[in-house]
Image (spheres, rainbow, N blue to C red):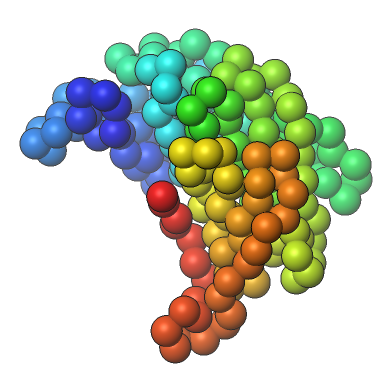
């Protein structure tokens, strides 16, 4: 949602973003043809409206992030493909998925197939990365959803480990909960998360 209540939807398999008003009425669409051109998408997934009234989109199939104004005009794109196990620097992705912003406008992206989270300034400047394959505290197995609370704690839906992890703003591990199963407090591949 933006401050006016408009709704933005990542229409993944249509390779587009749709904007609806708060009553659900169609307003606009951008993208549509799978492409690597700026302003186009290939399987977009996560998105977030930042406090600076811009829209950040995880262009998953193109392994990059894109930044738009709320009218659908592309402002910036950054990122390219890279394997973490080959030492991929921050800003390289292997299927970016979840997107969240904090109150300062910083951006958090789950780099799903690299089993890590990356943090950027609102202009795409890289700040830090954390995580690796594993089931120990602070490690991930295909993380997807990410969200940030009002004090800056980060929550990650760790799909392959069937749990949620919580980190302090400086990425220090705080706690994890959940395990594989169908019981109360257990999960089977948790994907989305919000606070």
Q: Is residue 102 left or right of residue 9?
A: right
Nearest to the observer: residue 113 or residue 38: 113
Q: Position of residue 81 (x, y in %)?
A: 73, 36
- State the residue in front, 151 or 64: 151
Tell which residue pokes out farthest to the right in this image: 86
Residue located 33% across and 24% down the image:
30
| Residue 61 in view | no
**Which of these two is toward me, 118 or 68?**
118
| The image quarter in which residue 134 lies | bottom right
Question: In the rendering, at what x and y percent does residue 174 appear?
Answer: 68, 58
Q: Is residue 120 above or below residue 112?
A: above
Is 124 situated left or right of 139 in this image? left
Residue 48 in view (yes/no): yes
Marks counted in the figure total 0
User: On screen, 103 above or below 176?
Assistant: above
From the viewer's side, name the closer residue of 164 and 103.
103
Image x and y of residue 44, in percent: 47, 39
Residue under the image location 56 percent in, 52 percent down: 155
Is 23 placed left or right of 40 in the picture? left
At 49% from the left and 11% from the top, the residue drawn is 75
Residue 107, by quadrant, is: top right
Residue 67 vertical placement versus 101 (above, below): above
The residue furthest front is 151
- State the residue at coordinates (20%, 23%): 4
Which image quarter holds the N terminus?
A: top left
In the rendered view, would you say 54 is above or below 108?
above
């Amino acid at each position: 949602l933006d401050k006016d209540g408009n709704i933005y939807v990542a229409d993944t398999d249509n390779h587009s973003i749709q904007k609806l008003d708060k009553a659900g009425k169609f307003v606009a669409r951008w993208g549509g043809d799978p492409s690597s051109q700026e302003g186009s998408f290939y399987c977009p997934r996560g998105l977030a409206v930042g406090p600076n009234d811009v829209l950040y989109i995880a262009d998953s199939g193109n392994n990059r992030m894109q930044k738009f104004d709320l009218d659908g005009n592309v402002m910036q794109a950054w990122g390219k493909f890279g394997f973490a196990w080959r030492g991929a620097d921050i800003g390289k992705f292997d299927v970016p998925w979840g997107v969240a912003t904090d109150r300062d406008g910083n951006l958090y992206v789950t780099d799903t197939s690299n089993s890590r989270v990356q943090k950027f300034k609102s202009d795409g400047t890289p700040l830090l990365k954390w995580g690796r394959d594993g089931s120990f505290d602070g490690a991930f197995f295909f993380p997807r959803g990410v969200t940030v609370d009002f004090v800056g704690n980060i929550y990650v839906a760790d799909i392959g480990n069937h749990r949620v992890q919580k980190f302090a703003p400086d990425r220090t591990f705080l706690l994890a909960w959940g395990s594989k199963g169908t019981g109360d407090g257990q999960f089977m591949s948790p994907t989305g998360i919000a606070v």
